[in-house]
Amino acid sequence: TMKRKFFYQLPGTAINIIINLTCIPFIGIWGAVISTIVTELVLFVLFLIGVNKYVLNGEGKFTKLVKPLLLPIVGTYSILLSILYFVI
């Protein structure tokens, strides 16, 4: 329901605002990039937990859901972080 979705999005929103307020004044647009990457990662994990709890009914299929998604996520974030390293 919408209440569940709100419950899972609220921490992501709070993290985004906090990181934006702390990073943007110091490193500009790259602070927004870092904030977005961290926020999306947190939201991804929270929604995976929600899917496991409410869709898969906590039947232990969570690992089967995460393993195929883990490599592209780690690869994408490592590429973005290496780009940030060379730009900053």
Image (cartoon, helix red, strand yellow):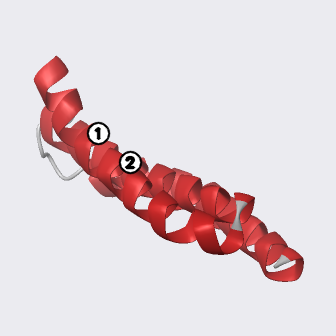
Q: Is residue 26 above or below residue 20?
A: below
Residue of label 1: 9
Specify whether 26 is left or right of 46: right
Pinpoint residue 19: horizontal percent, then vertical percent: 46, 64
Q: Are marks 2 and 1 in contact (CB under 8 Å)?
A: yes
Specify whether 79 is left or right of 16: right
Q: In this view, does 78 lie above or below 14?
A: below
Residue 11 appears anywhere in the view: yes
Residue of label 2: 43
Amino acid marked by disc 1:
Gln
Task: Choose top left, top right, bottom left or bottom right for residue 25.
Answer: bottom right
Specify whether 87 is left or right of 5: right
Pinpoint residue 60: horizontal percent, then vertical percent: 19, 53
Where does the N terminus fall, quadrant-wise?
top left
Real-space Cα separation, disc 2 to disc 1, in angstroms: 7 Å
Specify whether 26 is left or right of 17: right
Q: Is mark 1 on a helix, strand or loop?
A: helix
Where does the C terminus fall, quadrant-wise?
bottom right
Amino acid marked by disc 2:
Leu
- Kindly give the residue lying farthest to the top in the view shown: 1
Q: Which of marks 2 and 1 is nearer the N terminus?
A: 1
